[in-house]
Amino acid sequence: MKPLVFKTYNTPTMVLTCGGSVGLGTSSPAANLHIHQAERPECGLSIPGGGTTQSVSAPAPISSFLLTNLYTGASAVRGFKIALISTSLTMKNSENGSVSLLSTSNHGVIIGPTGRVTIGNNASYSANTSYKLYVDGGMLVNHAANGDWGYALNINVNRDLTKAVTVVHPTDGEVFRVLGNGTTYAKFITSKQIRVAVNGSNIFWPDYVFAPEYKLMPLKEVEQFVKENRHLPDIPSEEDVLNNGIDVAEMNALLLKKVEELTLYIIDLEKRVSSMEDKKGGE
């Protein structure tokens, strides 16, 4: 048997092989449908719109292209479908399989049957099943904003202890974490400037130390407290810090409070020394 060849001006344009393959622009189709264009860069399958909105699940939607094989079940219309529905191009795999767009090096985009998307190496698709989006090789977000307060990346969570953002090191494990309630854990932070906002918190800046009604603890009581507790009043103990850490804003306020109290002690001491010198000079 010979293939069925269609010609235009004696030039073969379409071939139907004995095995049922169709070649457009090629006499040796390498697939069930092989489209080849050697003279112009434009080559592809055109699906003109039918002008009527239809469901992708319809048996035969207007403006569609369907691929089926032996693994698509008893129904001949189940398989991979490309359809132009109204003005929207839709690709659907009617079987419980994935849709892959891969290069010759097996890298690309894979969309799984549950909507999980893997970008990168094909081998990473089956290895990472717990993420809706897995990017192998890195990701860059380039946000060209037209105004202030826009979102380059917006992560919405519904639990306080959800790990919204994590950084995992191959040997050190999780080195950075942002929880849903905003709590951030980091192994090490280097910054040119850190601003701690205390508005709305329970932290009060200790200017009240210099108020006339402030009661300064006598140094004898301070001495006794230090002997018994081995830390200054109002300052957390070593055990508390090791177990609970410190609040940076609160600790800065407490340290400033101690500096201001120390200033009052020095002023009081200076008054006493001056008074003693005046008495000594008057003798």
Image (tube, rainbow, N blue to C red):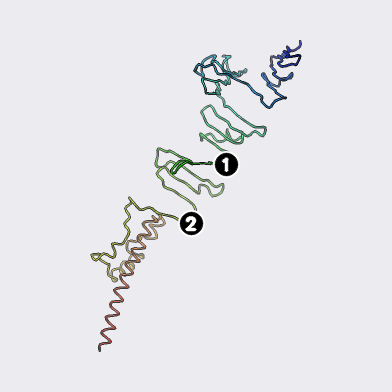
The residue shown at (56%, 49%) is: 171
> How many residues crowd mark 2 within 10 Å: few (<14), some (14–19), many (20+)?
few
**Circle 1 — which element?**
loop
Q: Residues within 10 Å of mark 1 (few under 14, many from 20)?
A: few
Determine whether 257 is above or below 33 in the image: below
Q: Which mark is residue 138?
A: 1
Amino acid type at image mark 1: Gly
Residue 218 screen position, x and y as percent: 27, 70
The amino acid type found where label 2 is placed reads Lys
Q: In the figure, is residue 59 to the left or right of 283?
A: right
Q: Quadrant of residue 65?
A: top right
Q: Is residue 100 left or right of residue 218?
A: right
- In terms of depth relative to the viewer, which is nearer, 133 or 44? 44
Measured as percent of width and height from the top left, residue 156 is found at 43, 38
Q: CA distance from mark 2 to mark 1?
A: 26 Å
The tag earlier along the polypeptide, 2 or 1, is 1
As drawn, 265 above or below 56: below
Which circle, 2 or 1, is nearer the viewer?
2
- What is the quadrant of the C terminus in the image? bottom left
Residue 281 location, x and y as percent?
28, 87
Could you say which is closer to the camera, residue 109 or residue 37? 37
| Residue hosting label 2 | 192
In x, y percent, where is residue 98?
57, 27
The disc at residue 166 is none
Q: Outermost residue toward the top?
A: 1
Query: In what quadrant of the picture does the N terminus appear?
Result: top right
Q: Nearer the viewer, residue 211 or 122?
A: 211
When the figure is inspected, residue 139 is found, relative to residue 80, above or below; the finding is below
- Asked if the residue under mark 1 is in contact with the one under mark 2, i.e. CB atoms within 8 Å, the reply is no
